[in-house]
Image (tube, helix red, strand yellow):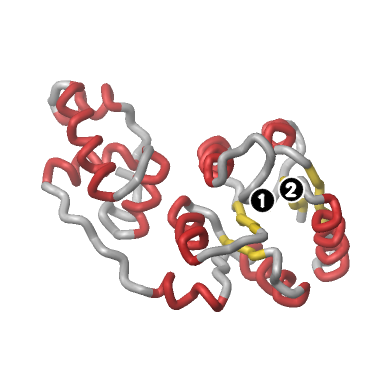
Amino acid sequence: MRILLADDHPLFAEALRLLIERSMSGSSLTIFGDLESAHRALAGPERFDLVILDLQMPGVNGFDGVERTLARFPTIPLVVISGAATAANVARAIQLGARGFFPKTMSSNVVAAALQVVTAGGTYVPADYAQAQARPPEVPELTPREREILAQLVSGRSNKEIARALDLQEITVKFHVRNIFQKLRVRNRVEATNAARRLDLVPAGPT
């Protein structure tokens, strides 16, 4: 398994490399100190099976780097790491679509076990934050039209394509999309898609 780490702390990065090589046979860790270099590598010919991204890096405003990476490389599982984990940060990472959140204070044994969970297709949340994650999410009330438009949005259609499919004016679609974002408490289409799937607001299959 090939893992990419974007982190600007060399000591932590090297410690993680040794841990992965020791605990995950046949795996390797490629380290980049900034987000742009990491993105260039992910867009290149070399295939990576997992991305580990530091939440706080130079030139990146917190979750902006997470959002940009998930939007550009949606098929590669991503784990967020941070030296200062909070319940809000953990919840935000999972809401955006991250497959895990690893505080840098985790012991090496726990990190190794958490990586195994993620690489097996699961999602890892630290035990200290699991209770907050387990609370039933509040499901917003969407109108029938908003649900129609959300389903179209999740399928990847643009506002113009949604307007054509539903026989609406594009400005009307924009109005509904804005209302949907407000009700879901999201800022963009990627977050809206993740929220819609998490809250079962759209069918599981393609629309």
Specify the label residue 18 is tagged with. none
What residue is at 51 percent from the left and 38 percent from the top?
71
Q: Is residue 1 left or right of residue 139?
A: right
Reading the chain from its start, which is encountered first: label 2 or label 1?
2
Secondary element at tag 2 = loop
Residue to which mark 1 is pinned: 54
In front here: 65 or 165?
65
Q: Position of residue 119 (x, y in %)?
A: 65, 62
Q: Is residue 149 above or below residue 55?
A: above
Q: Is residue 178 left or right of residue 79?
A: left
Q: Is residue 167 left or right of residue 184?
A: left
Q: Position of residue 177 (x, y in %)?
A: 24, 36
In front here: 124 or 28?
124
Q: Amino acid at mark 1?
A: Asp
**Do the residues bearing badges 2 and 1 touch, measured as CB atoms within 8 Å?**
yes
Q: Amino acid at mark 2?
A: Asp
Q: Is residue 43 left or right of residue 157?
A: right
Residue to which mark 2 is pinned: 7
